[in-house]
Image (cartoon, rainbow, N blue to C red):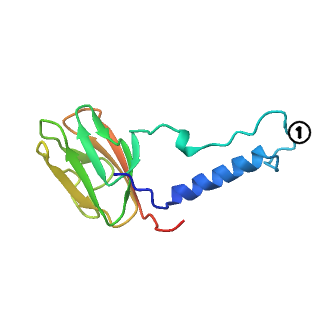
Amino acid sequence: MHRHRGRTGLFRTIAVVAVVAGCAVGTSCGSSAEKDSSGPVVTADPTDRPDDDAFAFSNTVEIRVGAVAPAQTVALVEEDIVLKNTTDVPQTVRVTNGTLGDTGPAETGPIAPGDEYRFRQTTPISIVYEITSQPGLTGRIQVDPGTDTI
């Protein structure tokens, strides 16, 4: 499930697009060099970009064989964050920079095949985790306050 509610990152994206658009039409961009206006103006269309399965706005992370999906996610505060085991063997998630939730454990314990582990974070934080049964398999969750308006 993708959430596309307004976020701080969206404001940064809009600001970057505005600056790039301003540069493209010849407004000052911090350079005194003469602008080349002989070529066409190219604008970015976010719908032309392919989806990136490694990144998403979601409160659910799937643990797969050899992967977590998405590997990097932005989740909302005060909503359950779900770690779902889609493999055929138990999986354990260990946070390498803190705990699961505000005061929870640093490790989930075994999550049975098909089961999930839920926790809730009430403050913005970056969570870095690893799957202990799959050495080298890591992921990140950025817990963000989000907003309902742009």
In the image, 48: left or right of 67? right
For label 1, the crowd category at 10 Å Cα-Cα, with few meaning under 14, some 14 to 19 and many 20 or more, is few
Q: Quadrant of residue 145?
A: bottom left
Q: Position of residue 132 (x, y in %)?
A: 21, 39
- Image location of residue 146, percent across then percent down: 44, 63
Residue at image mark 1: 34
Pick whichever, 148 or 98, lies toward us: 148
Three-letter amino acid code at disc 1? Glu
Q: Residue at x 63, y 42 (%)?
A: 44
In the displayed structure, does residue 32 sit left or right of residue 69?
A: right
Classify residue 107 as left or right of residue 139.
left
**Camera-nearest residue between 19 and 3:** 3
Res 90 → quadrant? top left
On screen, residue 34 versus residue 92, left or right, reads right
The image position of residue 69, as x and y in percent, is 32, 41
Most foreground residue, 9 or 134:
9
